[in-house]
Image (cartoon, rainbow, N blue to C red):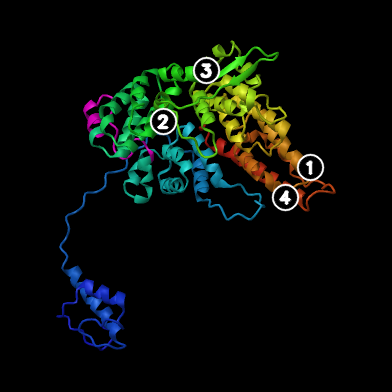
Amino acid sequence: MSRTTTAVDASLPATWEELVTTALLGTDRRTPAGSAPGPDAPSALLDAAAVETVRRRAGLRPARAAERPRPAPDDSRPPLPPAAARRLAMLLADRPGASGGGRRGTAPDLMELLPQWLAAANARGFAAPPAELPALLDAARGRTDLRPAALRFAGPRALWLARLNPDWRFALRSTPGGGASVPGPHDTEGIQRLWQEGLFAERVALLTAVRSRDPAAGRDLLATTWATERAEDRLMFLDSLRAGLRPDDEPFLEGALADRSRNVRATAAELLSALPGSALAGRMAVRAGACVAVDRTRDVPEIVVEAPHECDAGMERDGVLAKAPAGRGERSWWLGQLVEAAPLGSWSRRLGGRTPQQIVALPVADDWQGELHAAWCRAAVRQRDAAWSRALLGEPSAPEAGGPGAVSLAERAKLLGTLDAAERAEWVAGFIETHGLSEAFQLLGVCATPWAAPLGRAVVDALNIARDAGSYPWSFSGVMGLAERCLDPSEAGRLDALLAIPDEPENASPGAGGYWSEAFQRLVTTLRLRAAMLRELAPATS
């Protein structure tokens, strides 16, 4: 079996480690034991490695048989209809290609339809096909936005697989109780043991689970070890109280205001300010009210502002940050924090019984309007106050493209998030009809899907206007992508008239009509594909 006539003395101590070292250094620098330097040294090294390999294998003792993995748990949910299972395999097999510049082609982007498919499958309570679980977990590994829906659809078998494959361990971290079984509500001993001895991720999952079924019990569990937790852990645990925040959480949060960590104090103050009836909210209302008043001596009532002259110890304890960011004045920085944390319901009493619309409409003296209204915007979002959000948004047809307090598109989007889905869609539709699509992308992102009919019509009409203007469609690719995912599939028939290549006006960009036709073809094809997906997921009728 030797490749060379060079003799290899098998009695020499050629250990595996020595052979590996020789291979790494090269036979020019180190000759294998028992062989002479020269062109035959590499073959001698391979022969010695073969002999050592046989020796090592022959010397192995049989290991104790490993315990077989436990079978995967059952999934009692009904299986997917065959057509839906084939569609899932197609969606998971799609791999988006590299962008071809501005031109996107007419084929639907299947991976972008996967979140919607998962949402529909979860709503109908189907179980994932076992054969597709690896591809589903791979897709969720690469896209964190898919994980909640994908893991819900994958069910208990996803956790079973994740314990066998390190690449899928994210499923254990992303699923409450994934790393360990969360004890039931009556297993007091098990809850205490896991809370005292579990890993941090397991404890977070336990606290989340207990908090979701009994908020008071979750808070009390946290209180048992609060004083001994690390600052970064206290912050994470405290953040878990956001879900199901209740007035009876106030005493615990008031205690956290004295925490030695500034971040913990700030989070506790933020949570307390979201409880309009809390003592902290009352203190903030007094402080903010002392800074803002209506001057009734003028012909037209006007809001006057006297910002704080200092940030005292009480303000700092209640979460006011004393040091202003670079470029911000200290007094305006303190004022904004006070107004943001004050209950919005207190302003009507403070400012003459006026409604939010009337308060927002008042002029503000000395250039304080931007600061004051921006703080009211943050307060409306934090306190989920729809009435104040409406006042600050103003009419969607306003010439300034937004309300007096909404100074950015991101801020308007947050305010819209406090309104119900129908009102949100109606406001954004009105905004698009007045201002077009150039500023609407962020606003569309907060609208419920599928878009309500008025919003869908407004988007399609605005796209049609842009097409008639003769510009390229690439400036609207983001909105077009949203339309593919969010437009009601029933709108596909109404779009057929837009598939033809239009006559291009004299000032149109060369070939723009063809690109628009291609974009609308892609939109219509995607809508019809979405409609087919929903039909395939419909339960069979007898």
Which stretch did the figure color magenta?
A: 174-194
Q: Position of residue 111 (x, y in %)?
A: 54, 46
Give the label, 3 or 2, closer to the camera. 3
Q: Dot 3 lies on which element? A: helix
Disc 3/disc 2 C-alpha distance (Å): 21 Å
Q: Residues within 10 Å of mark 2 (few under 14, many from 20)?
A: many
Helix, strand or loop status at disc 1: helix
Kind of residue at badge 3: Gly
> Crowding at label 4, few (<14), some or many (≥20) Cα neighbours within 10 Å?
many
Q: Which residue is mark 1?
A: 468
Return the disc, 3 or 1, that comes first in the chain's sequence: 3
- Quadrant where the N terminus lies? bottom left
Mark 4 and mark 1: Cα distance apart in space: 12 Å
* Marks 3 and 2, the one that precedes in the sequence: 2
Which label is found at residue 515? 4
Res. 266 mark:
2
